[in-house]
Amino acid sequence: MSDFSLDWGREPRTGVAEAVLCEPKSPAQIAAILGAAAENGARLLLTRLALEQHDALPSALRERLDFDPLSRTAILGGLPPGRPVEGALIVAAGTADLGPAREAARTLAFHGCAAPLIADVGVAGLWRLNEQLGRLREARVLIVAAGMEGALFSVVAGLVAAPVIALPTSVGYGVAAGGAVALHAALASCAAGVMAVNIDNGFGAATAAIKIIEAARR
Amino acid sequence: MSDFSLDWGREPRTGVAEAVLCEPKSPAQIAAILGAAAENGARLLLTRLALEQHDALPSALRERLDFDPLSRTAILGGLPPGRPVEGALIVAAGTADLGPAREAARTLAFHGCAAPLIADVGVAGLWRLNEQLGRLREARVLIVAAGMEGALFSVVAGLVAAPVIALPTSVGYGVAAGGAVALHAALASCAAGVMAVNIDNGFGAATAAIKIIEAARR
Amino acid sequence: MSDFSLDWGREPRTGVAEAVLCEPKSPAQIAAILGAAAENGARLLLTRLALEQHDALPSALRERLDFDPLSRTAILGGLPPGRPVEGALIVAAGTADLGPAREAARTLAFHGCAAPLIADVGVAGLWRLNEQLGRLREARVLIVAAGMEGALFSVVAGLVAAPVIALPTSVGYGVAAGGAVALHAALASCAAGVMAVNIDNGFGAATAAIKIIEAARR
Amino acid sequence: MSDFSLDWGREPRTGVAEAVLCEPKSPAQIAAILGAAAENGARLLLTRLALEQHDALPSALRERLDFDPLSRTAILGGLPPGRPVEGALIVAAGTADLGPAREAARTLAFHGCAAPLIADVGVAGLWRLNEQLGRLREARVLIVAAGMEGALFSVVAGLVAAPVIALPTSVGYGVAAGGAVALHAALASCAAGVMAVNIDNGFGAATAAIKIIEAARR
Amino acid sequence: MSDFSLDWGREPRTGVAEAVLCEPKSPAQIAAILGAAAENGARLLLTRLALEQHDALPSALRERLDFDPLSRTAILGGLPPGRPVEGALIVAAGTADLGPAREAARTLAFHGCAAPLIADVGVAGLWRLNEQLGRLREARVLIVAAGMEGALFSVVAGLVAAPVIALPTSVGYGVAAGGAVALHAALASCAAGVMAVNIDNGFGAATAAIKIIEAARR
Amino acid sequence: MSDFSLDWGREPRTGVAEAVLCEPKSPAQIAAILGAAAENGARLLLTRLALEQHDALPSALRERLDFDPLSRTAILGGLPPGRPVEGALIVAAGTADLGPAREAARTLAFHGCAAPLIADVGVAGLWRLNEQLGRLREARVLIVAAGMEGALFSVVAGLVAAPVIALPTSVGYGVAAGGAVALHAALASCAAGVMAVNIDNGFGAATAAIKIIEAARR
Amino acid sequence: MSDFSLDWGREPRTGVAEAVLCEPKSPAQIAAILGAAAENGARLLLTRLALEQHDALPSALRERLDFDPLSRTAILGGLPPGRPVEGALIVAAGTADLGPAREAARTLAFHGCAAPLIADVGVAGLWRLNEQLGRLREARVLIVAAGMEGALFSVVAGLVAAPVIALPTSVGYGVAAGGAVALHAALASCAAGVMAVNIDNGFGAATAAIKIIEAARR
Amino acid sequence: MSDFSLDWGREPRTGVAEAVLCEPKSPAQIAAILGAAAENGARLLLTRLALEQHDALPSALRERLDFDPLSRTAILGGLPPGRPVEGALIVAAGTADLGPAREAARTLAFHGCAAPLIADVGVAGLWRLNEQLGRLREARVLIVAAGMEGALFSVVAGLVAAPVIALPTSVGYGVAAGGAVALHAALASCAAGVMAVNIDNGFGAATAAIKIIEAARR
């Protein structure tokens, strides 16, 4: 009997497809899952796939993957056809937050959604944020990626009417190491309507955004 | 000079009105804010207003408030006119979670939204949840209130396509005291698309839901 | 004088044999213990034996070991003769939980007990669990291995009459890193009769299951 | 629509009846649940019912309850008829641990099981434990209640063959305040076969013991 | 022999006078210290003096105190003569932060320094802060009091050249209860030159500000 | 569009220049930022630049950097011309604290300030500190770097009139691992006027000191 | 059968008598223990006996107790006859630390040992400590009681040859609330030979000191 | 000016010599300190010297060191002449605790004290401890090294009259990772007279034992 059982019915049921969290899996386990998907002709999203794990996969599988080392994501089977759905916008406080921000962008793309990414708008230089205010206010849902003290979540949420998904990142050291300060800042925000996902969980932020956009289209 | 400055422009800018978090304020401070709002003929929502705080307010102000002790909310100026906007649904794991769940319901009502509340559908008896599956799948956005181990967030999110706002409650003792286990369960959920607000933050869950519903109406 | 002293009388006294926790020991220390056991003709179970530690053992000892890298366990002296005792069942939420789940299965086998292992039945897809409900209800004791938010412990315990031993795993990231969320979910479960062992402690889950099965046979 | 929904089918499905955790509930909520049960002629177990909560119940309901302030438990409808099932034994490290230990004993009695309670056998005076060794070794399952450093869990588990359910208590101060040290000592025990329930969760320890005894009777 | 020994030489040595932290002291201990100071004709600052402690002091001592319940401070012997030194400015995020903010203002006054207090300029409504930008930029040192997510520290520090002393407050609930999130936000700030004092430590913020102003006057 | 946007206007606005926190960035990201600065003829400070990151930069960029491995800082474009501003003094408890202490010294130098560094004056040998008392009392602002139990912050602050910036370091093991004990000791100091920056944040300590010195010069 | 079992043989076996930790016990439980001791003509030490608990004891028992509210200790049966053994010295950082310091002094007296108590010698005014240096250096063992940042432990241990028992107290607020910072400072001390007991555990500090003095007399 | 300043007067002042904590130092820093000591003809103890650090020292220095990789200690200048002082005994729960236990033994030897080491007497097999009871009761001071749940501290302290220094080790995983559970078990011990040092701090345990033995010889 096989050790895994992919939930192919998840997308019709919940609106988002099952993805494979690779970090705690061995290359052999990942290869087995990929092989089964490839045989089925299925599309598949892999997250938290380290460069070393990717390089340890059989080359025949590697060649079929679209792999992005910065976000540690890989896509099997390409993007869906047709014009992507718009409405989501991703904001990253600094260049160091781009890994999780791109995990979100790639997850959105995998599900047929487009999301521009605005980077380096941290609160220590508010004028950079102000310059982007027009684009921020046009979005239907925002994903804001920030580490350290996470002040950007509150500042953005105080400026726009759209729901804000806070994506805390593990960028920081000392008390901020691991991202808990940014996460707690999102949860304790004095601005209304901020929702948080787990630290560095770009996939979760994106799937939540997709559900919000889909809710608007029903 | 006055010690407070209400942000009357917040609703047009962010879609939700400013509310008054009463817990850390003295009755005198609350009375001053209420008095200023009443003079302006403004509507106002008060959250985390303890029974003792409420009873210490001047009776002339108390009489103008619609106070609900279970949710510790009070509304000045009544609900908005017109038929409420539908689409939100609130699910509470147990009767002990009703305080935050009702804070969410009352916040939604204050902003002109209706949200039915389904209670006592914890995962230890899945059949109770199954009986409500139809109603769950009709909602455009769900608020799920649960304390203790917070398993309900993942189970519901695995069954519906709508976005799920997890509202962890401080119900529990031992390791679960204060609600951190439920909060972490929401953040670490194996189901996609779960977003969390702070522990017992029914106001935050509701304002996020309002923004999601509004995003769908734009 | 020797630096270690194995407790050969432990099995008659407590029903389970002493095992060697290898992680904090040097290869030289492990080799000395193995050598003493081999001289005595004794059977021995080694847990948390990393591949690097295993490979640093003298080859004469290595050849006598049945080593399983996924569960990091090794057995000296083979399994006990005779037909294994039945009654235990192991359930793993995902493929990433298989390491601790197999540590439990191998510990049970070392003590003469058989335990089937059902994998990939996480709560985000309840139908997979429902398909296995018959087998779950036949077991005399269940070991449930899960990481992340650990919702599976409560869901399984709400469906069966047998005692449930929760085996939280360190699978997860962000707030779930290290397994504390899954552990706390087991302890705070709203379902009655869930007991927890330490994170990733498949050995402890298995020895507890053995004691429960033995209690039933007295 | 009612705010609660008791799971009357839980006992046949899981072997233990639903109980009412009273701590987070208002007296009005508790009274409503009790009233519904009394109308049904049902037996019901209430846990974590504070003296103040009990005294605030309507006297007609109070008179029908068997209330024990030390364990904060109350029983509606009396104990089940017939001779209680034997096999469980409860050990408490000190008199201060008697509250949770009695919650366990009363829960066992509610389900028709008898469990003697041995108190004041902490490890600082091992001779007291040695005097009880015969009784300890006769039990089919042991519940050990201890706070502070929780050394008793490991010492008992090293002496007996039966499974040990560790019931950590919140007895202690400084680093031990709240019971986390005792809980962690149970989870990190160097003795095999120790399982833990939540801090002060005598109900959970008892229902686990009932399931273990029932597993032995099938 | 006496149980206390005030350090009268502290002010010449360190620039700030010793103050009496009243919270952990009994009224009798506070009265003894006050009595000794009054006999010496000394001025004295008392911090964290709860209303109950104040009311339990002998009335002869109470009458000589200038007591402020909101900040829980009392001053014996009045303010120093002469025109106060200027340069410090205090900013409070919300009315709930006024207790610690006033503790700082009163400590500054006790040492002969004046500090205006600007309240209710939280980041959820940035325009309120912008209106005060001129005054903020004139100060030689700023004390910023904020609880919840503490985003105000970073926003202010990004706008001014003066050193910013972050005074985190215990205002908040859930993950923000006790003030740790605001403290960590100050320490992890992405803006340069933010320094933090302990949670609710208005006295410490003020004495640091005094030392900074004095450093400028040497 | 570029992924980063340096804030060249920060120095006139806040008194300190933007620095590049390298730890969470890839060598490619660092090289891009350095290249843009070099093209502009700008000076730039890099912090937390690991030796491995430095060695992975293109050699043409490396040659233009003044890199100090102990403090993990690098300076592009040299120090500012003119005689450095005096007034700051840095004190380090032990040789192990020299990394963060030198990060502070180099940051001060980058901004045109000189700061002597006194090392190895921990409180276990108070005579070493006493020997330096004269120099300590001459400084306008002190940065004190200490790990382990951080007692030096309180001892120094009790001896001098100047403001003390506590720079806790991650030196320590067991309970002190990571620097939290030293940080908390700074925040809980019984001596008035101690301010803390994040663990190992020599850059933050230095920029705060610069702002204090500048405040004195206005 | 009785619910408690005092260990009368503990003093000959371990050098210190059993004491009764009263905090987690009901007045009825305390009275039962006291009654049994009084019947035996035994001496008994009670610790952490709150004023409310004391006042709820039967007056006949209360009259036989020597009760000290500040240290929350009571002694039944008086002090032992004969001249007390000398050698221990107790140092308290501030008046707020006198509760635990006196618990230690009273425990020493109960066991026939004398220990002078020096108060208010915190490190923010080192000259007060220097004045007492002669007495400190004469002691055979020192108990140092301090809360907040606990710097006194390291400073004293750097000045004397005798062993130092650190008695951290719960005096403090913010990060220091509960005493963990002082405890960690003792454990992480840069001075050799500091040993710690639990927060506020004056009894433990005293019994350790007694054992050290007795070790010197054997 | 040199970056370090050894405290050669520490031994006469405090009874124990200064040691060099190597972990946070670079090989160059360690070599400089060793070189200075060697020039002075001084003896020196190095602790937490990793194999890699040792191997990176100049061979001329390495040859003069007595290095023990298991305890990560090195001694320059040999042991002191004369017959070692007796009275201390070291007990280790398991072979995995031998690193810190040997650090203690080597520190004692460096200071001219002998201490036998008894290993593998964990509480899961109490008979092994009982066999050593005579030797335990002869010691003047005991160092007990244990990780995991640390039950051995309480059990030993309940059996002997000598003071017990608990040396918690970082042996363990899951909740016990890093040694905090063992440390807390020592601090919360129900047995009187247990004192704790930091996790893995064999040096601190030994210097405390030396001070206790010296106190007995004065």
Image (cartoon, coloured by chain):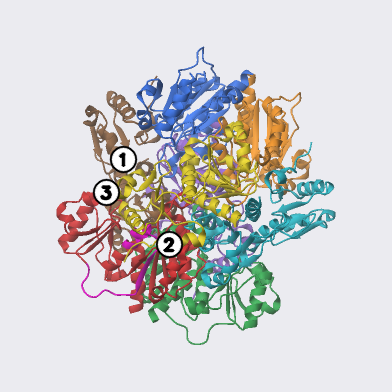
Chain colours: A green, B red, C cyan, D yellow, E brown, F purple, G blue, H orange
Label 2 neighbour load within 10 Å: few <14, some 14-19, many 20+? some
Q: Position of residue H121 (x, y in %)?
A: 69, 38
Q: Which disc number belongs to residue E189?
A: none
Query: Front-most of D54 and H152?
Result: D54
The part of the chain drawn in magenta is B79-102
For mark 3, give the secondary structure: loop
Which one is closest to the eye, mark 1 or mark 2? Answer: 2
- In the displayed orientation, state which residue is furthest to the top: G82
SS class of the residue under badge 1? helix
Q: Tell which tag, 3 or 2, sits nearer the viewer.
A: 2
H63 relative to A105 in the view: left or right? right
Q: CA distance from mark 1 to mark 2?
A: 60 Å
Residue B84 shown in magenta? yes
- Tag 2: amino acid: Asp
Left-right relation of E37 to D99: left
Q: Chain of mark 2?
A: D
For label 2, the SS is loop
Q: Is residue E57 located in the magenta-colored stretch of the structure? A: no
Q: Position of residue F202 (x, y in %)?
A: 51, 50
The mark that comes first in sequence, 1 or 3, is 1
Would you name the residue on which mark 3 appears?
Answer: E116
The percent coordinates of residue E146 (x first, y second) are: 35, 53
- Identify the residue under disc 1: E107
Amino acid type of disc 1? Thr
Identify the subunit bearing mark 1: E
Mark linked to residue D7: 2
- Measure how far apart labels 1 and 3 are at the Cα level: 13 Å
Residue D116 seen in the figure: yes
Residue nearest the viewer, comparing D75 with A100: D75
